[in-house]
Image (spheres, rainbow, N blue to C red):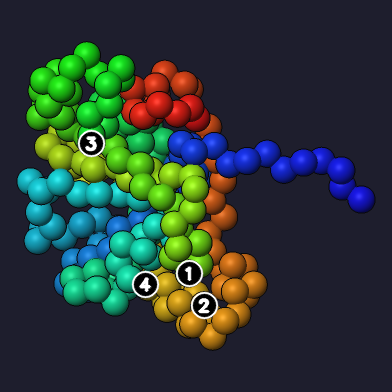
Amino acid sequence: MNDQTERPEPRFRVRGRHTGSTITVYQAYHPGIGRPAARDGRFPTTWKRERMTWIKPSFLWMMYRCGWGTKENQETVLAVEITREGFLWALRHACLSHYVPGLHADQAAWQEQLRTAPARVQWDPERDLHLTPLPHRSLQLGLAGEAAARYADEWIVGIEDVTPLTREVHGLVRAGELARAGELLPNERPYPLDHDALAHLLPGGSE
């Protein structure tokens, strides 16, 4: 018998599928962008780098956001493998997407930081297979300006179209076969980060 008590999940912690040199994030696009990106391993020229793009290390939060790939212009789900160095650069240069007293000097200082930062972070409730919110939070990372350019041109190691996986998992969930659906999910583990990489992005919590 295992007498060890399972520790509660920290409210704020980065979790994802990662290797020694990369982390995988998810995005969903119209097939006109998603399919060429997966085929060529880079975004096509129609991808608008001047717009903020949001990347998510959580597969199930991506499913919540894109409705299992059923929402308009989000029908193609991509797993984008990026370098650890790029991900860390984005976190170190990010601003929290909302004002937190004590974390920011004042609201004006936060607004100025938000205006100039090339990346921003928000923490949203993680999701289960039914896309029901869980008590702990999932990281969403928005990239703009220099960060978006670095993402597209420097950080990407590979792009995979995981739309078939999305449909398969969704079908099992709809059929009530949650155990089988869970077995197909990407192996997402706590992502090792120095505290100083996240300290400015933790709204009253800890890693």
Residue at (44% x, 57% y) in the render? 133
* Residue at the outermost top position: 105
Instruction: Choose mark 3 or mark 4, whichever is in front.
Output: 3
Q: Mark 3 or mark 2: name the one nearer the start of the chain.
A: 3
Residue at (36% x, 29% y) in the render? 203
Residue 193 location in percent, x, y? 48, 28
What is the C-alpha distance between the residues marked 4 and 2? Answer: 11 Å
Residue 130 shows which numbered tag? 1
Query: Does 207 sit left or right of 197 as displayed?
Result: right
Residue 119 location in percent, x, y? 22, 35
Query: Does 42 sit left or right of 1 as displayed?
Result: left
What is the C-alpha distance between the residues marked 1 and 3? Answer: 27 Å
Q: Mark 1 or mark 4: name the one nearer the start of the chain.
A: 4
Q: Which residue is mark 2?
A: 173
User: Is residue 113 in sight in this rendering?
Assistant: no
Query: Does 91 sit left or right of 153 as displayed?
Result: right
Residue 68 shows which numbered tag? 4
Q: Nearer the viewer, residue 156 or 143?
A: 143
What is the C-alpha distance between the residues marked 1 and 4? Answer: 11 Å
* Residue at the outermost right position: 1
Residue 97 shows which numbered tag? 3
Instruction: Choose mark 1 or mark 4, whichever is in front.
Output: 1
